[in-house]
Image (cartoon, grey):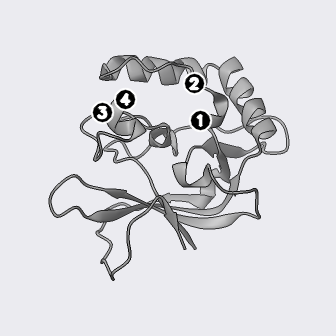
Amino acid sequence: MRYARICPNTNGWTSPSGGEKWSRLSFPGLNGFGFDEWLLGTPLITAGRFAGCKAGFIQGFTRYALRPPEDVSCYWIDGAAPRQAHFALVILNCQKLSPTDARAIYAQYKRGGFIQAMANSLNALNPPLNPVFPADPLDMFNVVFKDGDAKLIATPHPIINRGFQYTRLFY
């Protein structure tokens, strides 16, 4: 099982929820949203080798090489002192996308109107900065998974800190 930090969200990770993000130095802290806030809200891919799957973004996958699908537990960190980590999602068989696949999925989502829907939801939030949108496809989609393999944890619960550091990605 891989663990990955994602952006806090009050919309069940189907669209950005706005609000303060835990770190002012991170992309979500600077821009008021994170691309991972759409993890469960992307439409099904309709063509290509990932037809029937959903694409999403998990920051922890950006620095790692392609590898077989893995199970991922996603957590977010609150801004209250002392900061706590909370489990939010479990994604089974999550697979990192190649740059070519990410660009093809982005093009499909753009043709289907989803990229414009993403921009519209950001405009409704009035983000603190005006991010360049649409962004590079590799900054928006880097993982793929089957819809039924992603599960929202209904009541996010704190992770008991057993002495390890919360990082973007750890085993």
Q: Residues within 10 Å of mark 2 (few under 14, many from 20)?
A: few
What residue is shown with label 2?
A: 135
| Quarter of the image where the N terminus is located | bottom right
Name the image quarter holding residue 75.
bottom left
**Cβ atoms under marks 4 and 1 closer than 8 Å:** no
Q: Earlier in the sequence, mark 3 or mark 2?
A: 3
x, y percentage for residue 160? 30, 77
Dot 3 and dot 2 residues touching (CB under 8 Å)? no
The residue carrying pointer 4 sits among few (fewer than 14), some (14 to 19) or many (20 or more) residues within 10 Å by Cα, namely many
> From what the image shows, is residue 5 above or below residue 44?
below
Mark 3 residue type: Gly
Which type of secondary structure does the marked residue at label 4 adopt? Answer: helix
Q: Extreme right residue here?
A: 49
| Residue sitting at the far left | 81
Q: Residues within 10 Å of mark 1 (few under 14, many from 20)?
A: some
The residue beneath circle 4 is 31
Question: Looking at the picture, which amino acid does disc 4 mark?
Answer: Asn
SS label for mark 3: loop
Q: Nearer the viewer, mark 3 or mark 1?
A: 1
In the rendered image, residue 113, in percent from the top left (x then y), is placed at: 62, 19
Which amino acid type corresponds to the residue marked 1 in the rendered image?
Answer: Asp
Q: Which residue is mark 1?
A: 139
What residue would you read off at disc 3? 18
| Residue at position x 51%, y 45% in the image | 40
Which badge, 4 or 3, is on the more N-terminal residue? 3
In the rendered image of this protein, does residue 136 appear above or below residue 61? above
User: Would you place residue 147 above or below residue 114 in this image?
Assistant: below
N-terminal label among 3 and 1: 3
Residue 126 seen in render: yes
